Image (tube, rainbow, N blue to C red):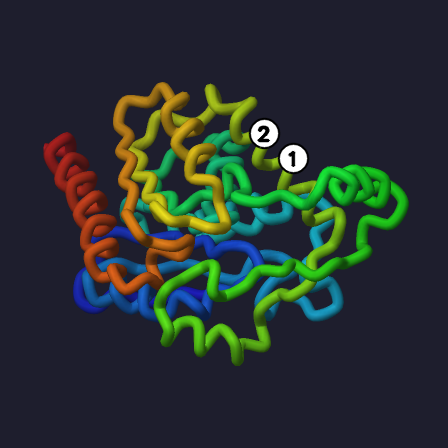
Amino acid sequence: MRKWEAEGKARAVIVLVHGAMEHHRRYGWLIEMWRVNHFHIVTGDLPGQGLTTRSQRGHIDSFNEYIIEVENWIEEAEKYALPVFLLGHSMGGLTVIRLLQERKIKPAGVILSSPCLGLAEYPPLPVNALSVGLNWIAPEIKVKSNLNVDLVTRNEDVKDRALNDSLFVTKVSVRWYRELLKAMKAAFTNISTFPDVPLLVMQGGDDKIVDKEDVADWFNRLTITEKLYKEWPKCYHEIFNEPERELIFEYAKNFIHNELLLIEYNGN
């Protein structure tokens, strides 16, 4: 777990949850943007990713491991006694969804960035069927993830850094894949348990990793008081790394500022 203190007086705390195969250090620009705009940040590497472990990189026994880890980050964020907002990208967004469906946590607001609610491309049916059996007899067997950096962003600087990033997970276990599928299904089947919290979903219009139709479907099924869906045309999966990222950040920041104004208004 890592924390960054806001520049000047903090208005709130952002709990930032990274996506699959990556780590929190890839969010340096975004962390600094929140910090200089008066927000504390709490984040870290999810189990089996980044610097959390070397021997079990790319493997989890259960998706609950992610939920438990992020719950710890939220508990740390709450120590600031400020409004807490959750920001989850891709699989981090799925983790936030499943956490809020399973735990009695009600943050001040939630931002989901290209949440992993369906894949743009699945393995062939025979491979998928094989993974079902292997999940029982050899769940730790790993296969190449085939995640191409050219598919996640149009930002050449980000791509260059990613190519030299030794912390990227390049292989994932059969169990990891099956747990991801199970979590995506659970996000839909348990949609009624998602809490009534302000929600902003931002989706890359040209996402080549996540199926944006599944994201929109999940969003449209939600029956909560305040929800907003924003698609960013031409943007690939990692919207906070795209050439339009400053505009995207301002959109996210304005969402949080509006929620803070409502909190202040209702508190008077």
Residue, far right: 137
Q: Which residue is mark 2?
A: 186
Determine contact: label 2, label 1, CB under 8 Å: yes
Please tell me which residue is depicted at 28% across the width and 30% down the height of the picture.
227
With 237 as the anchor, is 258 left or right in this view?
left
Q: Quadrant location of residue 169?
A: bottom right
Q: Position of residue 18 (x, y in %)?
A: 47, 56
Q: Secondary structure at mark 1?
A: helix
Residue 79 visible, this angle? no
The image quadrant of residue 126 is top right
Identity, as a three-letter code, of the amino acid under mark 2: Ala
- The residue beneath circle 1 is 182
Residue 169 seen in render: yes
Q: Position of residue 63 (x, y in %)?
A: 64, 43
Amino acid marked by disc 1: Lys
Vertical order, 104 against 66 (above or below): above
Name the foreground residue: 121 vs 228.
Answer: 121
Q: Secondary structure at mark 2?
A: helix
